[in-house]
Image (spheres, grey):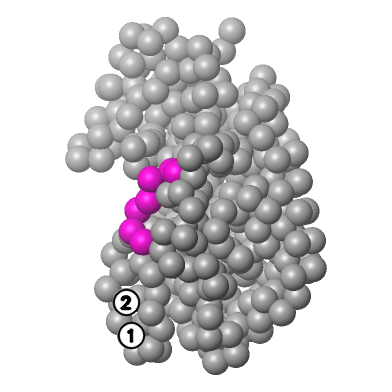
């Protein structure tokens, strides 16, 4: 029987989709998995000694590495010298980073060739692995489950945001994410600033924090837009804003350094609350948002297109209702914990 040792530094309490995905893997594998949390403060070559010891102490027999490089390099070496099998989990950005540098590209190819399985979060990420000569027969698409965040349990005591924040008559556009350039919050701020000329009752609320916050706050001031920067929210508060908003919007872009949105679970989170969503045609977003079916897609870095899409949603309550209803159905039926567990177990057999 295969027993896995998940090796990664990206685990809760860290925030973000990668940490949540790894937490979902641990839940799905249950007693068939243990965890080795990589210490980022130590050089990764230390793992050559640490991982064999960890396999022995946990009585696991297969490495499950949470990134292609550098942990995948250690897994490849250990398979060559000690015959230890390994599988790889890929999220998108890790593969893009490997593609950009010839030395990393060469090493990533070796890692993929030696892996028994390659788990990816989307067809977009699967296509990236094929650029590194990954065998398609060993690439398995396992999208993240909706249940990776407890916010989606809709707590019975979810706060009434509209009443508590005096937003009874507002049209709320809500967004969630780490405040970094890749997420496109600057495009969203510009789009909503334009939108307010027609819909003055619109309020933009952004949950999350990060190094780009100061720049975004300055942009909002220059656009004369009073954005509500909410910071990192507890699950119940995040759920309350999903429940209160009229539209969820996140407008990611692909950066020149390869940083890209590999999937976008937040669109499905919003959909689970029956909310229409707005995204971009970037990375794996079109897999999370089915254009004209669960939401709308616009080009990245186009605030005018985003403002137009938001306006069309605000003008058409029937469209909002239809997209929200289909988003809720898809989120609940296709992205459950049970579906994730079944797909992951099938991939790792």
Characterize the local packing of mark 2: few (<14), some (14-19) or many (20 or more) Cα atoms within 10 angstroms. Answer: some
* Label placed on residue 19: none
Residue 7 among magenta residues: no
**Horizontally, is 60 left or right of 266 in the view?**
left
Residue drawn 33% across the image and 16% down it: 54
CB of mark 2 within 8 Å of CB of mark 1? yes
Residue at x 72% of width, y 79% of height: 315
- Residue 73, image x, y percentages: 41, 37
Quarter of the image that includes the C terminus: top right
The image position of residue 319, as x and y in percent, is 78, 69
* Of residues 62 and 322, the one drawn nearer to the viewer in this rendering: 322
Q: Residue furthest bottom?
A: 197
Image quarter for residue 5? Answer: top left
Mark 1 surroundings: few (<14), some (14-19) or many (≥20) residues within 10 A: few
Q: Is residue 187 visible?
A: no
Mark count: 2
Q: Looking at the figure, which quarter contains the N terminus?
A: top right
Residue at 38% x, 45% y: name it: 234
Vertical position of residue 274 compared to residue 349: above or below: below
Q: Is residue 160 visible?
A: yes
| Residue 36 spot, x, y in % from top left | 35, 25
Up/down of 136 relative to 275, above or below: above
Nearer to me, 56 or 22: 22
Instruction: State left or right for residue 345 relative to residue 53.
Output: right
User: Residue 264: x and y, percent?
Assistant: 57, 54
Q: In 3D space, how far apart are the residues under numbered discs 2 and 1 (Cα atoms)?
A: 6 Å
Q: Which residue is mark 1?
A: 221
Note whether 101 is above or below 216 in the view shown. above
For the record, the magenta segment spans 230-236
Residue at numbered disc 2: 217
């Amino acid at each position: 029987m295969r027993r896995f040792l998940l090796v990664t530094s990206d685990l809760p309490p860290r925030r973000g989709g990668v940490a949540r995905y790894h937490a979902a893997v641990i839940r799905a594998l249950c007693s068939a998995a243990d965890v080795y949390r990589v210490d980022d403060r130590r050089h990764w070559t230390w793992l050559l000694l640490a991982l064999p010891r960890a396999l022995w102490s946990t009585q696991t027999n297969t490495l499950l590495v949470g990134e292609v490089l550098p942990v995948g390099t250690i897994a490849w070496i250990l398979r060559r010298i000690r015959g230890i099998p390994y599988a790889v989990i890929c999220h998108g950005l890790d593969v893009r980073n490997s593609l950009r540098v010839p030395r990393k590209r060469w090493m990533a190819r070796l890692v993929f060739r030696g892996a028994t399985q390659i788990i990816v979060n989307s067809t977009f990420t699967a296509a990236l692995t094929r650029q590194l000569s990954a065998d398609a027969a060993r690439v398995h698409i396992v999208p993240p489950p909706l249940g990776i965040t407890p916010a989606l349990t809709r707590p019975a005591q979810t706060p009434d945001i509209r009443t508590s924040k005096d937003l009874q008559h507002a049209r709320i556009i809500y967004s969630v994410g780490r405040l970094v350039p890749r997420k496109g919050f600057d495009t969203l701020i510009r789009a909503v600033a334009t939108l307010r000329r027609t819909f003055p009752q619109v309020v933009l609320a952004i949950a999350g924090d990060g190094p780009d916050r100061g720049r975004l706050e300055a942009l909002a001031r220059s656009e004369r837009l009073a954005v509500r920067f909410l910071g990192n929210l507890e699950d119940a508060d995040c759920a309350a804003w999903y429940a209160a908003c009229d539209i969820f919007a996140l407008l990611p872009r692909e950066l020149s350094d390869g940083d890209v949105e590999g999937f976008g679970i937040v669109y499905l989170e919003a959909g689970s609350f029956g909310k229409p969503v707005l995204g971009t045609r970037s990375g794996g977003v079109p897999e999370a948002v089915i254009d004209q079916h669960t939401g709308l897609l616009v080009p990245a870095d186009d605030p005018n297109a985003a403002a137009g899409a938001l306006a069309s949603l605000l003008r058409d309550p029937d469209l909002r209702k239809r997209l929200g209803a289909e988003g809720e159905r898809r989120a609940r039926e296709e992205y459950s914990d049970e579906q994730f567990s079944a797909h992951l177990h099938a991939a790792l057999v």
